Image: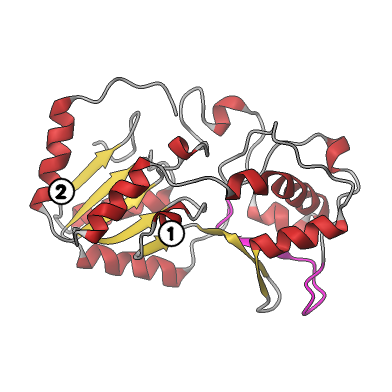
Amino acid sequence: VPKHMPVQSSDANTLDRFIKEHKKILVLTGISTESGIPDYRSADVGLYARSKNRPVIYQQFIKNPEVRIRYWARNYVGWPRFSSMSPNYAHKFLKNLEDKNKIAHIITQNVDNLHTKAGSKNVLELHGTAYVVHCLKCDYTIDRHKFQDVLSSLNPQVSIKELYSVRPDGDVELTPEEIGGFKVPECPKCQGNLLIPRIVFFGDNTPKKRVQRVNDFVEECDSLLVMGSSLFVYSGYRIVLGTKSANKPVAVVNIGPTRGDD
């Protein structure tokens, strides 16, 4: 969690009033830092501030076998810790509001499944989920936990330690020596080797049907509450723009400035 000033009572009162005044709130989140999963852009503590490494670009994953091997090796080592993370107070707070019928839908920019773990029902994962692996050439899918077992059987020489710092999409940083010799399975259905998490990689586009669902949510809601997002990525910022263009109120709760502050 980045450094921040104490919460001002006036801000808390404003948020409380916003929630009480609206009955069909659309919520956009990125609230996993307090669960131990870092974000990308927070000052001093985000991935970009702590490392020169950048997320894998979709086109690199598709075209370069070495990139795929490196990605899966890091993801394999980071998965036990990433998948063990628990919902934090913010996830539970939204679940409580959902139970009170204050929230129409939750749209999360995260891929960590924490809203579902908290018990929320109406969740749209804007950027997909790290909990499903699928083949790009056929309709094969596999649960990520089961895929971990597949990777483990192929790579008994790779040890998983608790010393690594997990990244926002679930992988960790490894040395070339640690990655060397790592094996990635082919799709058991079509024998293709393009098995990939069902997430929207950097450089890829959010599926059109998902974008349409978001647009429908904006039309249904009476307001938008943004929690824990800088709105730097356009797929999230677009939701703010759509809500404002519909003349519906927007509230933003975040540590640090956001793209939607104007």
Image quadrant occupied by the C terminus = top left
Look at the image and tell me whether residue 103 can be seen.
Answer: no
Of marks 1 and 2, the one in the foreground = 1
Which residue: 57% across, 57% down? 204
The residue range painted magenta reads: 186-203
Query: Magenta includes 153?
Result: no
**Type of residue at label 1?**
Thr
Rendering coords of residue 48 (x, y %): 56, 31
Q: Which residue is mark 2?
A: 19
Horizontal side of 201 relative to 216 (left or right) equals: right
Query: Magenta includes 192?
Result: yes
- Return the mark for residue 116: 1
Which residue: 85% across, 59% down? 153
- Indicate the quadrant where residue 81 lies: top right
- Return the mark for residue 219: none
**Type of residue at label 2?**
Ile
Horizontal side of 122 relative to 1 (left or right) equals: left
Which residue: 56% across, 42% down? 168
Decide which of tag 1 and tag 2 comes sooner along the chain. 2
Which residue: 38% across, 62% down? 123
Look at the image and tell me whether residue 1 can be seen.
Answer: yes
Rendering coords of residue 183 (x, y %): 86, 56
Q: Is residue 12 above or below residue 214?
A: above
Q: Secondary structure at mark 2?
A: helix
